[in-house]
Amino acid sequence: MDREKIKPSDNLRELIPTFEFSDNSEKLNLSDFERILNKTFKEFSVVSNGGSGNASFILTDKNERQSFLKYRTHESIPWNSQRDKIFEDYEKDSISWIYRRKNGSWFCKELFSREATVLENWNQIGLPSPQLIQSDYSNYLLLEFFPQAETVASMISRDRSPRLINGLLDTLKQYREFANGTKNMDNIHMDLHLENILYDLPSDSFKFIDPGVLVKKDLSVAEVDAYANLFFCYTVLSNYFLGESVPQNTRQTIVSNYVDMLPNGMKNLMQGLNKPTPQYVMDFFSELKWDQKIQWHNSFSKDKFDLVQHYLK
């Protein structure tokens, strides 16, 4: 997609950063933003309204070209550091401990900066991903939009043809050839799972999206890559990330082929870092009756740990 032809009117760069991004605001006021968008684009639709520190929009210009706008908004949930410390104490022995906590607007500011940088790197080397059209690396991202795309997680629930699986594996191999041995944290997809890989019908191609997620800063690039690889393997094996209709042999084909793409040194590092969610973590969230957390941590259970270790050997 041609970056120059899609570029919105020149005032977008000037207008969006003039908003006040207050961590104390209670909700996103869309009215001013809508007036600006209506001046700039023929039409737009709201995808999300700012419930997690950012809002997103599909924009359509007068020539019917579409783009995707992510806009940093506000602190969505009052920050409770005491509560967060309790969660971190319980999650320190699981894969969750590597991720930095989401702190609404502040989190999105850093996340937008990282996503813009990663996409810029991926665009330069030709890794299939949305084109970064415009960003101030802080408050907004304007990205290429794929109106006829579907997540691989959704597709694979009904289509497990060799064509789809082989195309997915070829795309993953292209990513691993770029990421293997990288010294740059901003080359790594830190949230790699099949919901974050699109299949675009018109171009008959796969696209990596949403490379974000922020990890603790005391980890090396190799450790972050190892944890991201482990996360991918677990998500493919988990019903929380893939529907129950996806059979085990399909999941295991994807995981085993992905692991084969990794250097031996990376596999060894992953074996050392890999560990299942401890039972006390499951008990803690069960007492809280927090079903989503229970399902999340159950994705990293002992049976899946054993499978992942098997493929790493």
Image (cartoon, grey):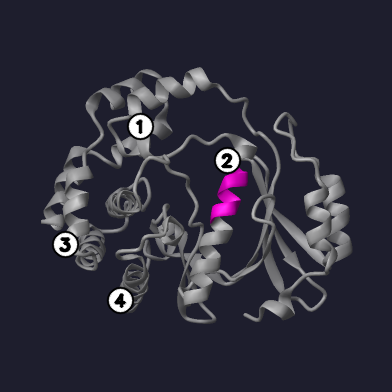
Q: Which residue is the site of mark 3?
A: 264
Residue 162 in sight: yes
Front-lying residue, 225 or 249: 225
Q: Quadrant of the N terminus?
A: bottom right
- Mark 1 and mark 4 lie on one chain; the one further toward the N terminus is 4
Dot 4 and dot 3 residues touching (CB under 8 Å): no
Counting from the top left corner in percent of width and height, residue 199 is at 47, 71
Dot 3: few (<14), some (14–19), or many (≥20) neighbours within 10 Å? Answer: few
Question: First in sequence: mark 3 or mark 1?
Answer: 3
Q: Which residue is mark 4?
A: 166
Residue type at mark 1: give it: Ile
Q: Earlier in the sequence, mark 4 or mark 3?
A: 4
Identity of the residue drawn at 18% across and 38% down: 302
Query: Residue 136: where, in percent of width, then height?
Result: 69, 57
Q: Between tags 3 and 1, which lies in front?
A: 3
* In this rendering, position of residue 284 left or right of residue 144: left
- Mark 3: which amino acid? Asn
Distance CA(mark 3)–CA(mark 1)? 33 Å
